[in-house]
Image (spheres, grey):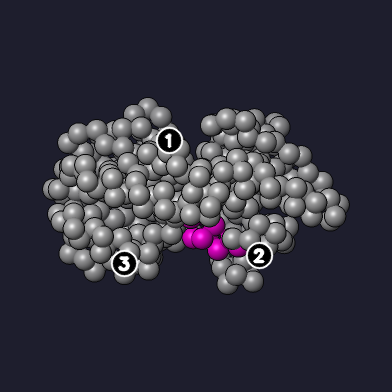
Amino acid sequence: MYHIIVNKKSRSGRGEKLWPVIEGELERRRTEFRVYPTKYHGSARETAARLTAKGVWNPDDVLLAIGGDGTANEAVDGITSLSDVKFGYIPTGSGNDFARGAGIPSDPLQALEAVLKGEEKEINIGTALLGSQKRRFLVSTGIGFDAGICHEALASKIKNTLNRLHLGKLTYVMIALRQLFYLEPFTLDAALENGEHRSFENVLFAVAMNFPYEGGGFCFCPEADGTDDLLDVMVVSNLAKWKVSYLLPMALFGRHTGFPEVHMERCSSLSFQTDRAEPVHLDGESGGHRTEERIGLETERLRLLGDWVKEGMER
């Protein structure tokens, strides 16, 4: 049985247009499935928690999420026991960073074909402790400039218009330019798992990544691998504002890591401490404004479905 969480509003309604196509293909293949449309923010998390509850979930079933990175994030955040769940994902959002990093086809029908192929790959799932609240992430969690862009994009009215014109990424560019104008750098202390402490002044943002891409295709951590039990960390500090317009395009190709203002690290857990409350995001979803974030990996892995032999992603 495929339990399908569908966000029909992803990419300003693109999910609603694509769902009948996916549904028709499932019916043509005589696949047994049940559909759970999302109804509000947090709906996918609640549905996944209810479906995968102890004594309810059948480990032979599949949890399939259809939507953007936010839908995938919510679904995984709600899973009761990661190792008991076979998880599939069909990207229909505007960013699709998880699909890009994990090797999932961007074409919905090709992604469905990969899920039905059913090759399993165990992937790491990130965790962030925000106060007393624990949240999971698939791709990344960040604090500062990148999170501020995500926060504003979530509330942006122009995003829907640009998505309908297939120009959704312009939303992030426009917001980034505005955020940059008002940006006030902050101080950040990073405590690594080995006891080392790193202090940074004039920080633009810091990010811990499980997969290489965030923000709709920025390859901030080119070496990030969601199967290696490690997080790749990047801190950008003492970067002149004028230089941001040069660094960000370079980051689309992962060629920014040689900048002296870009600091890279790899570890399985760490914490960020800032001198004032800064915006936090998890896979582009808001984590509020925080002065501290403790980041790590779940001990259990998630069984991600795909055609990994075809994609060259076998592990």
Number of callouts:
3
The tag on residue 307 is 2
The answer for how far apart the CA atoms under marks 3 and 1 are is: 27 Å
Q: Which residues are magenta?
A: 96-105
| Residue 222, quarter of the rendered image | bottom left
In the rendering, at what x and y percent does residue 258 appear?
A: 24, 69
Q: Nearer the viewer, mark 2 or mark 1?
A: 1
Find out whether residue 252 is within the magenta segment: no
Q: Foreground mark, 3 or 1? A: 1
Indicate the amino acid at tag 3: Met
- In this view, the residue in front, 54 or 19, is 19
The percent coordinates of residue 49 (x first, y second) are 60, 32
The numbered mark, 2 or 1, whose residue comes first in the sequence reads: 1
Q: Which residue is mark 1?
A: 155
Secondary element at tag 2: loop
In front here: 246 or 33?
A: 246
Residue where numbered disc 3 is placed: 250
Tell whether 221 sits left or right of 115. left
